Structures are given as structure tokens and as C-alpha cells.
Image (spheres, rainbow, N blue to C red):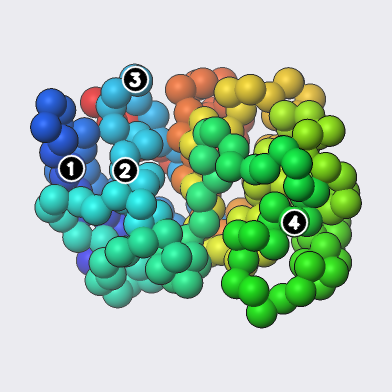
Amino acid sequence: MTPGLRLELNGISKQYPAVRANDRVDLRVKPGEIHAVLGENGAGKSTLMKIIYGAVQPDEGRIFWNGEPVSVASPAQARKLGISMVYQHFSLFDTLTAAENVWLGLEKSLKLPQVAARIVEVAHSYGLDVDPQRPVHSLSVGERQRVEIVRALLTEPQLLILDEPTSVLTPQAVDKLFVTLRLLAERGCSILYISHKLDEIRALCHHCTVLR
């Protein structure tokens, strides 16, 4: 364990029947750091992020969260710890509004109108343009991603994981995303940023880990 880290992975391994997805991976992320995770397709980037988020269980290794050893058994537990993830493929229902989609992913202590108000508040705070009453089927890809990010931010994460977030975005949408991520980092949120685009990583990230 290294003092002062938000997240530390020691010797994380994951074996599937036909492939070893992760082989003794070490990773360290500080508070407020934007940390890139690079590697070719099949290098195990997404598997590693799912382990951090509790969607996949490692076969070996240890996870430290804010200096304490943890076992992240599920995404629900990850969110309670302060870990949120935006997947490469969005998980929104086209027939519902942005607010309804966000509300479905939250604990039901808040009513739908309260969630809609919180969406406006959080979106404005981070420079995101999100209309909670818009049906998802009417949103562009960039707008759908902003809904996913706001949904993650409503859990007040200390670590936000983004899996290939720019793969389907226009250059203008990428620029808007980077503004939001830099603001998040300035406010102390750590970010794990999976990408294979070196120009983006140079422009955005403080450090990087390469998986082979």
C-alpha cells in the first residue's frame, strides 16, 4: 500500500478459459489525476476496469481504496465506495426521457422531479448541456454520453472510469468532454481514461499505464 493514493491495484490477474485477460497488473491513481490506460485490443483494458467497478472478480491480487484494502463485489458496492463507470456502449432506454433513464439507475429515495432538478444542477455545474425532459431517441451520440456522465456524477464519485469515451464522438463533442473532465479533476475526482488515441492522451492525461 502506498500512502496518498485514491486507488492502488497490486498484482491483479484474471484468467478466462481461452485467454489470460490480466496478468499481475499494478496500477496507482492519485486524487484529481486523469490516468490513461492504453493497450491494443485484447490487452485486458476493459476487463481491468470491470474489476475495479465490481462487474468482474479478479482471480488474484489486491485492491486498495483510499489506503484501505477492499473487495469490490458488485457495481452497487463500487458506487457506494465512490466509483462510477461510463461504458463504451451506452445503457439508455430510447423510449424514456433522460431524467427517467437517470432515475432508474439511482436509489429510489429521490422522486423523478427531484432527479430532474438534480440533473439540471449537476449538468450546469460541469458545463454539460442536458435537458432532462428530452426523450433519449431524440438525442445525438454526444448528448447521450452527457446523460451517462451526469448519471455517474449524481453518485458523487471519487473515481470516474471512462471506457473509450471518444470512439463515436465528433471533434466538437470531444472538446466539450475534455472541458468537463478537466473540471472534474480540478475538483478532486480521479479519472481512469481508456483509449488508444495518443493525441487525446497527451492533451488530457497526467499519467498512463500500458497493458500488453
- Chain-order first, disc 4 or disc 2: 2
| Residue indicated by mark 4 | 100
- Chain-order first, disc 4 or disc 3: 3
Mark closer to the observer (4, 3): 4
What amino acid is at disc 1?
A: Lys
Q: CA distance from mark 2 to mark 1?
A: 8 Å
Q: CA distance from mark 4 to mark 1?
A: 36 Å
| Residue indicated by mark 3 | 40
Q: Secondary structure at mark 4?
A: helix
| Residue plotted at (36% across, 52% down) | 55
What amino acid is at disc 4?
A: Glu
Q: CA distance from mark 1 to mark 3?
A: 17 Å
| Residue plotted at (70% across, 52% down) | 101
Answer left or right for 92 relative to 179. left
For label 1, count other residues whose C-alpha is less than 10 Å away and answer few (under 14), some (14-19) or many (20+). many
What amino acid is at disc 2?
A: Leu
Q: Is residue 116 above or below residue 58?
A: below
| Residue indicated by mark 1 | 14
| Residue indicated by mark 2 | 48
- Chain-order first, disc 2 or disc 1: 1
Q: CA distance from mark 3 to mark 2?
A: 14 Å
Mark closer to the observer (4, 1): 4
| Residue plotted at (52% across, 56% down) | 84
